[in-house]
Amino acid sequence: MNLGVTLSSTSRQLPLDDTVALAREARDAGLHSGWFGQSFAYDSPSLAAIVGREVPGLHVGTAALPIFGRHPLLVSSQAQTAQAATGGRYHLGLALGTRHLTEGAFGLPYQRPIGLLREFLTALRPLLETGEADFHGELLTATTPYSASVPGARPTVPVLVAAMGPQALRVSGELADGILPFLAGPRALAEHIVPAVTAAADAAGRPAPRIVALVPGAVTDDAEGVRRRAAEALALYERVPSYQRVIELSGAGRAADLAVLGDEETVAAEIRRYRDAGATEVVFTATDLSGEDDRRRTWKLLGELSRG
């Protein structure tokens, strides 16, 4: 099973050289991938491109880039450039974002998000595959008067969506290569998320989707202390309706209940639960909730499990 870690997030911004060094450590530990959240600081596709080029062998991805305020032509250019820079090891993660962020920070109306997602993916796929588009939708237009292909951007960049609700899962199954659920425990994955996105992909004649589960977790001897810190760090998600729903479907009372914490045996057993629930990949997040010793223990275990 491919296992990875987040190397940056909205709360974890390191100097570029430190991020590259951390990525090398992740690769040397045997991890398959490193992922970068999008904040108002670093541009995550650019950061992934730099790190992926500096650290051969490590797959890199964005988790995830909000589509409101962005255009498929520009996102395609970013993604293809990152793919060429990394020699085919880049993974594009997209998200709907939230009403609070979209309207408060961007000043854009958060209207028809599912419709926008469908049109965005419909326009984006041919751009990534052929460098051409001629799409005229209700919410956006994307046309190419000349080729938008980036030399060396092969294979076609895989597209994943941070989808967890029924409508977003349906669109993602039809038009994307997989999903990036966060705070979706094994129960929610097995009973709601994986069946929905897989059925949509099957109905559209597409391959079985990748299920890249983002999971807060750490190997630690202080599970209670780390969970208390996780409760503070993850509390904002409990105010977002889509996360409220998936936390409840996971059988948890709060986001921190879904953090995977404990010794090596405990964490390995939980990762197997995610695999059995249908996750094809697991990415550990919130590595800054614990100390450096715990982080190294966590990465060592993940690397061992990833190598099989």
Image (spheres, rainbow, N blue to C red):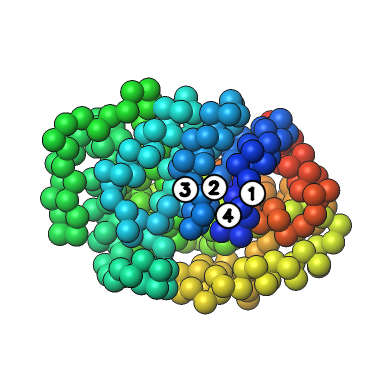
Residues packed near mark 4 inside 10 Å, few (<14), some (14 to 19) or many (20 plus): many
Residues packed near mark 3 inside 10 Å, few (<14), some (14 to 19) or many (20 plus): some
- First in sequence: mark 3 or mark 4? 4
Q: Is residue 53 visible?
A: yes
Q: Which residue is mark 3?
A: 43
- First in sequence: mark 4 or mark 2? 4
- What residue is drawn where x is 71% and y is 30%? 28
- What residue is drawn where x is 58% and y is 54%? 9
Residues packed near mark 1 inside 10 Å, few (<14), some (14 to 19) or many (20 plus): some
Q: Is residue 127 left or right of residue 32?
A: left
> Which image quadrant is residue 32 in?
top right
Give residue 290's position: percent from left, percent from top: 77, 57
Q: Which residue is mark 2?
A: 36
Residues packed near mark 2 inside 10 Å, few (<14), some (14 to 19) or many (20 plus): many
C-alpha span from label 4 to label 1: 10 Å
Q: Is residue 180 visible?
A: no
Numbered disc in front, either 1 or 2: 1
Q: Secondary structure at mark 4?
A: loop
Looking at the picture, does residue 274 appear above or below residue 247?
Answer: above
